[in-house]
Structure formats: structure tokens, C-alpha cells
Amino acid sequence: MNNHPIGIFDSGIGGLSIFGQISYLLPNENLIYVGDTAFLPYGTKSRDLIQDRAHKICSYLLSKHCKAIVVACNTATSVAIQKLRANFSVPIIGIEPAVKPATQQTRSRVIGILATEGTLEGEKFATLKQRFGNDITILHQPCTGLVEMIEAGDLNDKKLHELLKIFVLPLLECGADTLVLGCTHFPLIKPLIAYYAGPKVTILDPSIPVANELKRQLELKSLLLKEESGMYTFFQTGTNEQFEKFICKELGLEPILYSLNI
């Protein structure tokens, strides 16, 4: 199974931040990426719908003989990963907001979480907050509309900048000196977030730990591919015209983007 691909999926382009770290850490691996753009964004969708989409996408990736699957979406991880692991036998790696590292780095003892409603309302975030919030103030900011703005691809859009002011500045006013990017879309605009947060604020995104965990699990099962150059395949279920442009811009690739009807 070593030469079998690794599957990665998200509601859209956000998981490309995870894809990039995986391709950097594991350059020999074949990767299949699915952006479920027909159902974007997951953060405002029902629990049942997200679980259904995650199951269908994983089933498709397994039909492509994927040896592991990365759920490159905080909301889908929170809502669906337990059922996915119960139903499928391959390693399934999820993602969660970097609350623990944030509590270790903050100096003001106040951290802010930028995430979707689905992530902030999920059990995983509640557990993280309970585990690490005893002597730390954890502020959470639902970022309604931000995923759609990022998917649109215009980083100069005035509405995008207005949303960032609305979401980031109140966290700073409450004393947050560390911000956690709790959605895989948000690292794609990390420079903009940093601009409004200022140079004294630490910004954390969890893409590197996810790639490290994937490598660890593949090593445990002796599934690493060590001697080839990885091949990358991209699918989307919708018609986001910015999808291919983001792959070119963020990953430096010239992909063939396939349509997927599932």
C-alpha cells in the first residue's frame, strides 16, 4: 500500500494550507485533494449534512485506494471524525484549534479563537476549552461570512477588510495577545489578519502539527513512500472559479482540476 495516495478534503480551498504542509513534509507521497465547494461553507451547515458529506467523500477517496485520509477542516473534524473512524479502517487524521499551544505562549493570559460557528459549537472545542481554560481567558469569535470571502479570492475587497476589523479588533481590546486560526481557510489570509492584529500578537495555525501527525501514523504502519516523486490530483464538487487560481498561487502548481459529482 505504500504507493497508494493520501486523501485530503475540506469544504473548499481552506484545506490547501494543510495540503501545502503535507506536500512539503512528505514530498514523495501521492495526494488527492477534494474541495466540497458545492456545500461550502460547512460552518453553517447542519451536523447531519456535514456527517453525510464527510462519509461520501471518504468513501470516494477509499475507492481511489487512499491509505490515509486527512480531514482538513475544523468543523468536519469536530462533527464527523468519530463516525468516520468507526466506519473506515484507514488512519483518519483530523484538525483542531491550537488552544493548547496558545495557552503556553500567551503572556496576557488571554487568547482569541477565530473560527466558524460549527467549530465553536462543537464538542471538540468545548473539551479543549475545559481542559486548557482554567487559568486562561479564552475568547471565541465566530467569523460568519469570512470563508465565503476567502473563497471569492479578492483579498482587496473592502468587505473582507471590514469583516477582519469586526472579528479581530474586539479580541485585542479584551487583551488577547495570541490568536488561534480555527479554520483552515484562515491561514490563506494570515498576512491580512496579522496586519490588523499588529506585530505584538502571535498568530497560530495548526497545519504543521497535522502534517506531523500524518507522518507519524504512516511510519507506525510502515506506509511511507520514500523513493518516488509525489503526484497530485485535485477535485471540486462545485464550480468555484477561484479554486484553480488558489492552487497555483498558494502551492505554486499548475494543476488539472477535475469535477466530482458525489
Image: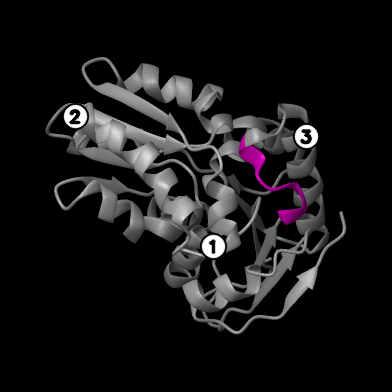
Q: Does the segment drawn in magenta span residue 40?
A: yes
* Amino acid under disc 1: Leu
* Amino acid under disc 2: Gly
Neighbour tally class for label 3: few under 14, some 14-19, many 20 plus, Cα within 10 Å: some
In this figure, what is the number of numbered marks? 3
Residue 69 in percent (x, y) is at 64, 53
Residue projecting furthest to the front: 158
Magenta region: which residues?
36-43
Neighbour tally class for label 1: few under 14, some 14-19, many 20 plus, Cα within 10 Å: many
- Mark seen at residue 49: 3
- Image-based side of 203 in relation to 158, left or right: left
Q: Nearer the viewer, residue 29 or 106?
A: 106
Does the rendering let one see residue 195?
yes
Marks 3 and 2 close (CB-CB < 8 Å):
no
- Mark seen at residue 175: 2
Residue 117 in percent (x, y) is at 55, 30
- Mark seen at residue 16: 1
